[in-house]
Amino acid sequence: MWMETESKAEGVRRGRASVALRALNGLRLCTGDMEVMDTYMQDRFYVVQLVMWGLRGVSRVILANNPLSGALIMAALCWESCWKALLGALGLLASTLTAVVMGQDSGEVSGGFHGFNGMLVSLLMGQLSSAGDWYWWLLLPACMGSASSVFLYSALSSVFKRWDLPVSVFPFNTVIMLYLLCTGPDNPYFPHHTAMPPGAPEPNGTKLIAIEVIRGIPLGVGQIYTCGALGPSLLILAAVLLYSPLLTVHALLGSAVGTLAGLSVAVNHHFLYSGLSGFNGSLGCMAVGGLFFTFSWRIHLLSIASAFLSAYADIALGNLLGTVGGSPSKQLGIYFVKHTDAAVDW
């Protein structure tokens, strides 16, 4: 009797261990680059492959390369605003299809390298527009700008290749800059918000709310996708965690460093509370410490330095462009420095 009981208990333990092992193996398949998914998709319908390419493009914005991460990020955009999700998906589709029609490198297309530029263009157009949500005329410049980013990517690739430099988001920055210069706050069809420099005086005094400042750290990660709510920002963090825990740590660390940099020069409280002070530092820290270099304590210190540089450059350019009547740095200039390998080249 005792032997039968012991045998049953051993069988239960082995069953639980087997289930745990299968769950762990399944989790491993869902993390990292998910290269096995590319093999699985080779013989699937073209539309299914197109969706996979698009999801990789979504995750590329935050320096990841995982279709499940891209799906979580799209869910976060829907949570934040269905209008933003529509704009992002439309820009992603327009740029990816343009790359296919132009005959761009199949590896770049399937890896999402063309899609994320188009997505950024459409998201920023929607974020900067003062016409409000569901302004359908905005879909026209969003589609045209997203498609144009592919032409710029192709043209710049041949130039940057000579110095072994990546094109990254230079097309996005160029398209957005031209769009903002062609329109303005008073444009009858495509108006956008006026600039507010980070160093603008605080109308409500100098008292800070500590909880709001801490809340702005995860919001800094969400602001990479123009998300200003805590729930979607946490979901975006979960998407990064699915791809790489190390990248997630550096995302939060960089956002905290960017917030600290904003505090050190007394930026407007809105930039601290909304995460706008931290998103550039987050990208800079992720690029150096979590993606492009083999991790070590020296690289970790360099990633912190990169986050400080990114944050201070953002504030400086924001004050400069806002003062001369341009647009905030998120709209025009420094965004690409932290968003790409440019931080690594530095």
Image: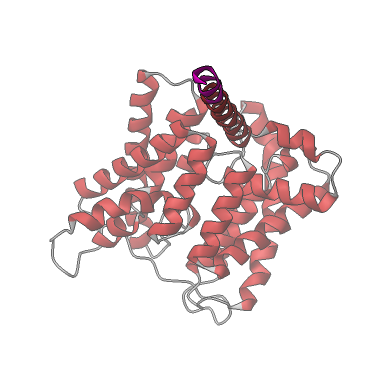
Question: What colour scheme does the image use?
Answer: secondary structure
Q: Whole-percent x and y of residue 61?
A: 55, 46
In the image, residue 7 lies in the stretch drawn in magenta: yes
In the image, residue 335 lies in the stretch drawn in magenta: no
Viewer-side residue, 322 vs 49: 49
Viewer-side residue, 35 vs 336: 35
Does 66 sit left or right of 261 as displayed? right
- The residue positioned 56% from the left and 58% from the top of the image is 75
Viewer-side residue, 251 vs 152: 251
Q: Whole-percent x and y of residue 35?
A: 69, 32
Q: Please determine whether, in this image, residue 50 is positioned above or below residue 308.
A: below
- The residue positioned 51% from the left and 57% from the top of the image is 76
Q: Whole-percent x and y of residue 309?
A: 34, 37
Q: Whole-percent x and y of residue 45?
A: 85, 49
Q: Residue furthest front?
A: 1
Q: Please determine whether, in this image, residue 302 is positioned above or below residue 106.
A: above
- The residue positioned 62% from the left and 34% from the top of the image is 26
Examine the residues drawn in magenta and state their main secondary structure: helix
What's the magenta region? Answer: 1-8
Viewer-side residue, 184 vs 278: 278
